[in-house]
Amino acid sequence: MSLFQIYKDNEFAGYAKYIQLVNAVKRSIEKGELKKSDRLPSITELRKNLGVGKETILKAIDLLKEEGVITAIPGKGFFVAKTRLAKVYRLFVLFDEFTAYKRDLYHSMLEGLSKKGEIQLFFHHYNPRLFNKLIIENLGDFTHYIVMPFPGSQVKESLKLVPRDKLYILDRNEMIPKRVPAVFQDYGQDVYDGFFAIKDHLNKYDKVILVFPSHLNHPASIVNGFERLCDDANIIGEVVDRVDFTRIDKGQAWFVIEDHDLVDVVEVVQNRRWEIGKDLGIISYNDTAMKRIAAGGITTLSTDFKEMGKTMITMIISGKDRQVRSMGRINDRGSL
């Protein structure tokens, strides 16, 4: 079977055109149709037989040359340089929603994958029907499926549709099926460990208040970890559903998950001409670049999202599947 026929068989449908051509060349080598030192069809021949543009062909040739699959001999053409080939990855990545820290995670994954393949990013917005639809519509089109699930019977059933050797779980530790590789956060333990490490800071406040919006999809283990911490560290704690301006008072520390709640608390402090870290303490969940400088620096409890993305891609490329906890830590700044 010729290179042209392998390409036209559309085995790699859904990939970018240049990746389809790269894969067709590699498949030709794997099948023995192209052997070491064989010459590839010329650019003109490829354009004529495949119906693709010169720019697409050149992009594929550049990638094949970079991987060492082919070599160029001036005036003669392109020749097969090796027959032991690296795998090309096509990743289906399903996030819950796009935020500043998810952007860091996504770009870290892109950087880790480099030119070994491509990522297509989708969002389920915590909608189980949309989650199921996206899974079903993309089955069979990708080499790996990296999914951020959320609690729910429909989500569990949808995950069962993905072949176990292609499924990877990201972020939610309570949704990891047995023996499925994952890079996850343990939210409750992160809150407990992180806050316990700074309990001396917290003990100077009369009360520590966690703002946990119950209508959103944050892990309930955050509340469990917070309540355990308060019991073990002798801290007076309270969990509220929203920021109530009338209840903000000096001597409190506020632990906020949503960034708009962080803005509300900071505005109250500034309007009352209080000093953050002295009159009122603030801790925010999930670190971003802006929190490093906002209001003189906001203390955060956060995992390293760049490292999380790097770990996931390294696991996939190495083939060494495992379940890895991405540890949260306190970034201690002036707001406590």
Image: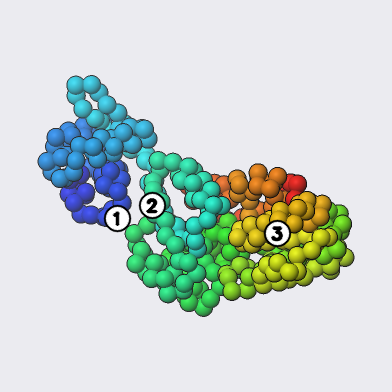
Q: What residue type is labelled 3?
A: Val
Q: Please name whichever residue, 152 or 203, is drawn nearer the observer in this view of the structure.
A: 203
Q: Which of 54 and 180 is in front in this view?
A: 54
Residue under pointer 1: 14
How far across and down, in percent of the image, does residue 72 sit?
A: 27, 26
In the rendering, at what x and y percent does residue 247 appear? 75, 69
Task: Give the alpha-carbon distance from disc 2 to disc 3, as whole Å.
Answer: 47 Å
Please give the label number shown on residue 268.
3
Q: Which mark is residue 158?
A: none
Q: Which of marks 2 and 1 is nearer the N terminus?
A: 1
Q: How far apart are marks 3 and 1 (CA)?
A: 51 Å
Q: Residue at x 19, y 24 (%)?
A: 76
The residue where tag 2 is placed is 90
Contact (Cβ within 8 Å) of mark 2 with mark 1:
yes
In this view, the residue in front, 223 or 158, is: 223
Q: Is residue 90 left or right of residue 178?
A: left
Q: Answer few, some or many: residues within 10 Å of disc 2's Cα (few below 14, many 20 plus, some between 14 and 19).
A: many
Q: In this view, does 168 lie above or below 247?
A: above
**Residue 194 placement, left or right of 73:** right
Which of these two is toward me, 275 or 239? 275
Amino acid, disc 1: Gly
